[in-house]
Structures are given as C-alpha cells and as structure tokens.
Image: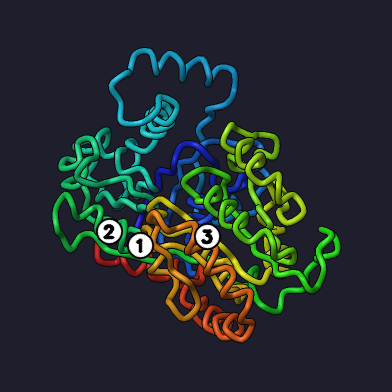
C-alpha cells in the first residue's frame, strides 16, 4: 500500500531531537525498511540534523520536510495564525499541516496515518479518498474533544497505545474500529547484561546505598513532589538515595521552571540523599538504570503508557508506581507495587520504599519477573502488530 504519515508538527522524524512519539515512528519505519512492506511518505518538520541521517537512504520510506523554524517560515506562520484563528491546534502546528497538505493532496495514498493528531481530520475530511488512520499515544480523542464525533466518524481505524486510551476514545462510541497496539522499546539498549560506563562512585554513591531512580520530565503531574515528601519521611535512613533524572522540558538542560525550583527547595534538607542530574541524553539512561535498585514512577495523572516503566522493566528493576492511565497494563503486581493516588499516597509511597529497602529477597523475585515481562514490549513486536493492524484497513 501507499501510505502517508502526518507527524506531530513539533519534532522532526527521524527523531534527531528525541521525543517518545517520534521514536515510536522510527521503530515502525525501520521495520518497514527491513521488510519492504509498504511505500511510506513521512511529512515532518525540518531540522538540519535530518539531512545526514541514514534513514533517508531507504528505498521504501520517503521524507517530505516542512521548514517551520527559518526566518521566512516564522513570518509565514505568524501570518497564517493571524488569518486562521479558529483552528484545532496551535497555529504553528496548523501551519505545518497546511504546508504538508499542499503536497499530500496532490498524491494518491491508500492510507493517511495521523500520528497522535486526530484533529488533523477536521482539515482532511472530504478532501481525500484515502482511508484515515489515527495512531494515538495520548488522550487526544474522547467525548470532550472538539468535533469528536466528526473526527471519530472520519476514521477507518484508530490504533491506541493502551487500553486506557482506547477506552477514552470509546466514550464517543463503542466501536471495533478502536484497537490497542502496545508500543515497545529497544530491548538491546535496555538489557540486564548492559556494561555501564558510569558507576555509583562517579556520583559519590557507595555500593551499600539503596538507590532509587526517578526519570522523566520534572513536572507536577509526574508525582515527583510527592516522592520528595516520601523521602522526607525516610530521612533517618541515610543509605536510601534518590536519583532524579530529567528537566522540565525535553532536551533542555537549562530550563528550570517555578515548580522545579520549589522542588529543589523541598529537597534541600535531604541534599545528601537526593541527586538532581538534570537532563541526561537518552543514550546514557542504561548507565543510570544499571546502578539502581528500584525505579519509582509516581505519576499522579493518567499517564497513557510511559516508556520509563518499560525501560526500568527491561533492566530487571522492581518498580513502584501508580494505578493511573495505562501503567497497570505495563506491569503486574509480581514486579511492581501499584499505589492509589489518594490522600494516603505519600504515606503509602514511603511504606513501599521502606518495604523494598528492607526485603532484598523480594526485590530479587520482582526483578526476575521484570526481565521476563519486558520481552512483551520490544520495538519489533510493536512494529509487527502495528502493520498487522493496517492489513485490515
């Protein structure tokens, strides 16, 4: 089949600037390049680093780039935003879509995939004979979404990364066109026999320390403030240490918002027990996971399907997390402590940490389950199941 993919309109594909959604797209494009399944054209924003990327040499995957960052492009975006105020997305994203459609609508495609942007259908519906497929990684389409019924009806297939998102889509209408395909990670990168280049001693940590790791954006919904509060309850345990890896926005080591500042103030009394690393390149994450005893993912929002859980699981770590969003679909109670985010959350978080700290045999058993379960979430499984889903379109 001949397929077009409309990306987020924010980050480039290939994922030279990171981005979980863009990385997932790279996974199934790599799979398509290997197996020569379809002729695919990706419509992406441009970045200078994509020009040298080996993915552009594929004979089945093609890339059409939209400049949104040059001086002329910025002027055009502003003008577009001025004359198009009632749009589904921010004017910058709508400008990317407008420029993409100039080319896309001149081509014949069997399928158009909207990568995490179902709202694009407002602009596309009735302008193409291609079948529309939405690929959702976030809660972007539900009964409260603008023009939800129109967008839902325009789709031939809606693929979600978790049952949580699928069920949110079904608040519009319970339909068999809504299916779940679990996303995956690069298991070869995250593996238990990984040989680290960074060690505990590099962070002034000892072999006897009990190390927990939080990774992700340092934002309120990720539950990091509650984790710091739980650490305050455990301040008498000097060998319980916490690594906080991440910044307040993707890839920005210097961006520290008010929440991040208040977080560090809360952590100040525990400055010997909490290490804020700031942004760490994704390629270095296995180094930090390999020195960790337990991963803590304390999301207090409905996290759709966080890859941090999958990465920790692949590294054979016990996990402390929450019953929010798609997280319970990633783990089981044999390798994760699942907590409710109620008024007792901080207390229960502290108790869960202390329980695993005091029971190394329990951590070992959970670790074995994590290793086995991680095999379900490989990037190969994800890409294969995604393309199998398209066969029914």
Left or right: 227 in relation to 175: right
Q: Which residue is mark 2?
A: 166
Left or right: 303 in relation to 241: left
**In this view, 103 is above or below 317:** above
Q: CA distance from mark 2 to mark 1?
A: 6 Å
Q: Which residue is mark 1?
A: 162
Choose between 65 and 57: the one closer to the eye: 65
Instruction: Say which element carries label 3.
Output: strand
Dots 2, 1 in contact, CB < 8 A? yes
Percent across and percent down for residue 97 are: 39, 33
**In this view, 349 is above or below 71:** below
Dots 2, 3 in contact, CB < 8 A? no
Instruction: Say which element carries label 1.
Output: loop
Q: Quadrant of residue 205?
A: bottom right
The residue lying at 81 percent from left, 58 percent from top is 203
Q: Which residue is mark 3?
A: 297
Percent across and percent down for residue 145 are: 24, 39
Instruction: Say which element carries label 2.
Output: helix
**In this view, 177 is above or below 253:** below
Dots 3, 1 in contact, CB < 8 A? no
């Amino acid at each position: 089949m001949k397929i077009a993919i409309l990306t987020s309109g924010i980050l480039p594909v290939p994922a030279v600037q990171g981005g979980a959604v863009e990385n997932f797209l790279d996974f199934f494009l790599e799979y398509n390049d290997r197996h020569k399944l379809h002729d695919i054209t990706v419509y992406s924003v441009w970045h200078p680093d994509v020009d040298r990327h080996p993915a552009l040499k594929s004979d089945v995957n093609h890339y059409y780039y939209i400049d949104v960052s040059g001086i002329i492009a910025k002027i055009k975006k502003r003008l577009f935003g001025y004359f198009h105020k009632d749009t589904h997305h921010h004017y910058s994203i709508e400008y990317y879509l407008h420029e993409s459609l100039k080319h896309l609508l001149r081509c014949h495609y069997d399928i158009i995939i909207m990568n995490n942007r179902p709202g694009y259908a407002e602009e596309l519906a009735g302008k193409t004979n291609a079948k529309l497929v939405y690929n959702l990684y976030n809660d972007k389409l539900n009964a409260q979404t603008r023009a939800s019924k129109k967008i839902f009806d325009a789709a031939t297939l809606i693929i979600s990364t978790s049952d949580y998102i699928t069920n949110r889509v079904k608040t519009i209408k319970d339909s068999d066109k809504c299916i779940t395909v679990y996303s995956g990670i690069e298991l070869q990168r995250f593996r238990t026999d990984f040989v680290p280049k960074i060690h505990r001693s590099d962070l002034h940590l000892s072999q006897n320390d009990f190390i927990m790791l939080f990774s992700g954006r340092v934002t309120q919904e990720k539950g990091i403030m509650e984790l710091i509060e739980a650490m305050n309850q455990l301040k008498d345990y000097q060998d319980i240490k916490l690594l906080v890896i991440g910044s307040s926005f993707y890839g920005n080591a210097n961006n520290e918002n008010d929440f991040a500042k208040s977080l560090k103030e809360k952590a100040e009394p525990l400055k010997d027990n909490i290490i804020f690393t700031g942004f760490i390149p994704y390629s270095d994450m296995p180094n930090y996971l390999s020195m960790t005893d337990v991963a803590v993912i304390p999301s207090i929002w409905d996290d759709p399907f966080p890859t941090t859980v999958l990465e920790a699981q692949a590294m054979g770590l016990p996990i402390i997390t929450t019953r929010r969003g798609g997280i319970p679909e990633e783990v089981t109670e044999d390798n994760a402590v699942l907590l409710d985010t109620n008024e007792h959350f901080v207390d229960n978080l502290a108790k869960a940490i202390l329980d695993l700290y005091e029971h190394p045999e329990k951590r070992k058993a959970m670790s074995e389950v994590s290793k086995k379960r991680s095999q379900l979430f490989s990037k190969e499984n994800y890409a294969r199941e995604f393309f199998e889903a398209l066969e029914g379109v």
